[in-house]
Image: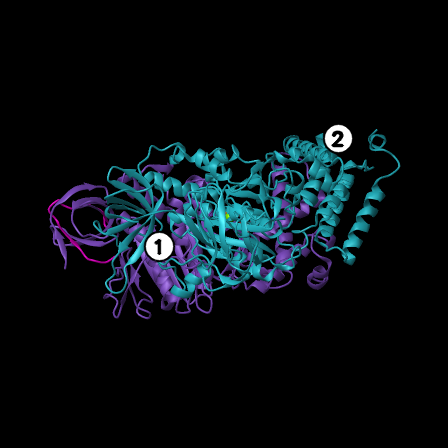
Chain colours: A cyan, B purple
Amino acid sequence: MTTKAVVAGVNGNMITARFEGTVRMNAVAYVILPQKSGDPIRLKAEVIRVRNDECDMQVFEDTRGVVVGMTIEITDELLALELGPGLLSLVTDGLGNPLEQLAQRSGYFLQRGLYLPTLDREKQWAYTPVARVGDRLHAGHTLGTVPEGPFKHRIAVPFGIVGEVEVLETVPAGNYRVEREIARLRLPGGEERAVSMVQQWPVKKPIRAYVERLLPSKPLTTRVRIIDSFFPIAEGGTACIPGPFGAGKTVLQQALSRFGDADVVIVAACGERAGEVVETLREFPELIDPRTGRTLMERTIIICNTSSMPVAAREASVYTAVTVAEYYRQMGLRVLMLADSTSRWAQALREMSGRLEEIPGEEAFPAYLGSVIASFYERAGLVRLEDPYLGETTGSVTVVGTVSPAGGNFEEPVTQSTLAVVGCFLGLTYARSYAKRFPAISPLESWSKYLDSMRSELEGIYGEGWVDDVREMQNHYAEGQRIGDQMKVIGEEELTLEIFTHYLKAELFDAVFLQQNAFSDVDANPSTERVAMAFKLARRIVDQPFTFPDKDTARDVLLNLTSLFRNWNLAAEDTDDYKRFLDELEAVIEEWSGKKSLAEVTA
Amino acid sequence: MKKIYQRIERIDGPVVMLRAKGVAYGELARIRLNDGTDTYAQVIKLRDDQVSLQVFAGTKGVGTGDVVEFLGHQVQLAYSETNLMGRTFNGVGEPIDGRAPVADTAAVAIAGPSFNPARRIIPSKMIQTGIPMIDMFNSLVESQKLPIFSVAGEPYNPLLARIAKQAEADVIILGGMGLKYDDYLFFRDDLASARDRLIMFIHTASDPVVECMMVPDMALATAEQYATQGKRVLVLLTDMTAFSDAMKEIAVAMEQIPANRGYPGDLYSQLAARYEKAVDIEGSGSITVLAVTTMPGDDVTHPVPDNTGYITEGQFYLKGGVIDPFGSLSRLKQVVNKKTRDDHAPLMNAMIQLYDGCRKVRQQQSMGFSISSYDEHLLAYGGEFEERMMNLEVNLPLEKQLDLGWQIIAGHFQPRQVSLPENLIEKYWPATE
Ligand SMILES: Nc1ncnc2c1ncn2[C@@H]1O[C@H](COP(=O)(O)OP(=O)(O)OP(=O)(O)O)[C@@H](O)[C@H]1O
Ligand SMILES: [Mg+2]
């Protein structure tokens, strides 16, 4: 059922419509733009405000050419996404249109008004039914499965159904296209409904077909040493990466998308550079994920609404991405969703709010910014799923969002609203990136609430006493920084050898453990065991009471150790270099750990 | 079917309002002033029969009784593959070089749709400029978008002109915004030798503000035409801060709520829409964008450089007459540095590290701390590095830049004092006399 309306006003990407009948908030509408020849162009829009017989809508396209009085069709459907097999490896725009297919239709440039189904209609899927006729099921329960990538994709009772349904019919195992009916259900009201492998889901609504939410307790290893040790991320948890431009947000997220230990990775390229998406797009099909033996692309979905694409669709893109994430979570999978950058999404909200002439809050962001950000991150989580056939499992959505604060100043509305809701804060600083200390995550300002809440799980992985060891290193490092700051003021001469050595050791720890070269295949992706080993080795150097005669020697030796350690970081396991650098490290540590204690030397 | 109106109801800054029917959003209109001259305007808001027009040449002298005619199309560019070379236009595409209008043109819409990300390729070709601080330390890559951050008074326009002359490109498009007339004359004369591949869109400080806003779109739409025909296009824009200020002026006239220091909330999207036109097209041409962004008060956190930094792929930081090696970054350099010479990346890093050391020693010295003999070497090295590499006058091919780097290092240090891999030292360290 559609409501007829006409254009009453155009202001950038906002169109005001005058309608007769009823409209629903967040409903999809199409502005019909007649063409001199051929079919009219249909511009997709979403209703975002209703006032008497007028409603305002954000248009997901360029509005040039729209004339007052043109026809608008307002549908009864909310902005929704197609869910079903075939999402993995897809690259879509913010509304779920597959970009490759768009390019096949319209060439180099995106063409406005061209919308294509997200899922391939022709592809056949090997369907195996699991539900039997007569079974009584609930929303989210599995009807059957198809293999997709490395796992079984569950085709579920549509998430929107409330109450118990009865399975009236199912198809036998076989190869089917996504739109083929695979089961017939009796709804609680008695009505019958045919179900295919695709379902539509309104992106702004969380999928809640699970039993309960659980407290995140398991780390999601990222292979980024400073994160996995100092500021761990939890499966089902949330983290944010604010930082000024060029500080390394995107490089860090790309590292997470490659090495993060998740079953499915959703990348939301939200209002950032198209070029960055292309790197992922071109490289992932070539890179093999050692965990599955398949290419990285097979576990990845890219929702791509880059900075020159329509702003309103940018706002939708983060919801599209998190909806896909929730969908795969329903299958008992661990999903990692990366959004770069949430600030661009917030800016899209701000632009629209300005057009709506709402009363602005700080920096002209709308007053509801905080609650919008909070409810977005709330869609992350670890959930318990119960399925009559597949038993009990958990699934998780972990959300990591970058924030691009104006002027790199974290005292701004988007950063502050985000910090209020996330479990882990990875703050990138200009000072560290300027000094090329990558990843530029501030070891002092950042925090993770999960370090303590995941204590037992972490110690299961890295060994007994891990969390305390980490805390001690954090304190040691902080003290080293304090000494460094002091030294800048009073000079090196004023420090005792002991204090100076503390500073050098903290610098060593920074250089060999906290810093990591994202562009080295080896250093960017150490195994968990190697991270633990590097930590212990660095810790040993830090704890070692060296017998240095003077500061110059202390500096020389520790710089030498730093250089050997960094070379070791770059050497792949089972190589000669790996062994050689380790041996040399041992030899140097040995050489300077004389029998005499440090106190004796300085006395 | 031309629509003609004769009653302007409101004139405010560069915006006029009138009542009209059947007008399209973005449509171009012509206003005939009472002195018989024409001025152009674009529809920027529609509400029932109220039409807001942004007048390109400003509203100075516009009268409420002037005739407004809607032209039935959007702002267009008169494109010709061959006849544009060597020509100069204003922000709305009219020739200002005293020559006849361009013959054999096709109308091309400006600010066209975005390039499909799925059709982009990973940039891979370096553009050599002969400038060591660019080629060796922060390589410019085809399809890159890079700003030159600078304060007023720095030689950013001469730098742009040098790059235009020395860079490998088929077509060079210069977009001038808010240029001093002298700067325009400088470009015209200095780039005379490159005329056969140069097109200029010029807005000078005394021209109407709205025309300033059109310059990047004109320049980039032209670039897109050539790039899709296989040409490697280098677009030089100066100064994007003037462009942003023009946008600010219009936003204020439209009574928009400013987001940050008076700039409109969509500054990021507006800048990005232009910069993202940079592209490398598979099997065809490319667009590379170098854009001067002056920083009021040398403040990188000012909204214009700040938003720019979030969009571009690094930045050149022009300071004290040189490209500062610390503040500058080409984010795409690693993709091309692998393919130049095996010592390129390590040598670059080692030289920067040593120069950083020199800088620290200078700081300590200035605070009255004593310095070691190693520090003396750093200081001497730093001096030579500035003189022979950072100096913007230096013009050398990359190979020679790298050789020079080894020479400078070897003049001040022992091999084990620099963090360079042994195999490279063996291969490149200059023999000692
Ligand atoms: N881990 C790293 N190792 C080495 N270099 C890095 C690392 N992280 C970042 N860099 C360097 O910093 C540059 C900028 O990084 P990145 O693109 O991730 O910044 P960003 O914070 O996303 O910036 P923007 O906000 O502008 O998008 C990279 O091109 C690279 O040169
Ligand atoms: Mg980034």
Can you give x and y, in whole percent of width and height, for residue B299 in the image?
A: 45, 40
> Residue B418: percent from the left, percent from the top?
70, 52
Residue appearing at x 19%, y 57% in the figure: B71
Q: Main structural element of the magenta stretch: helix, strand or loop? A: loop
Q: Is residue A197 magenta?
A: no
Using residue A396 as the reference point, say whether residue B369 is left or right of it.
right
Name the disc covering residue A358, or none: none
Q: Is residue A64 visible?
A: no
A315 relative to B370 in the view: left or right: left
What chain is tagged by disc 1? B
Q: Name the chain letter of the residue that bears numbered label 2.
A: A
Q: How many residues crowd around disc 1 within 10 Å: few (fewer than 14), some, or many (20 or more)?
A: many
Picture residue at 30% right of the left edge, 58% below the top: A41
Look at label 1 and name its amino acid: Pro
Disc 1 target residue: B216
Rendered position, B428 above or below A463: below
Magenta region: B53-74
| Cα–Cα span, label 2 and label 1 | 59 Å
Residue at x 66%, y 54% (from the top left corner): A291
Residue A294, x across and y down, in percent:
62, 59
What amino acid is found at the position of numbered circle 2 in the picture? Answer: Thr
Left or right of residue A420, residue B78 in this image? left
- Identify the residue position indicated by label 2 in the image: A496
Q: Is residue B283 above or below residue B365?
A: below
Circles 2 and 1 on the same chain: no
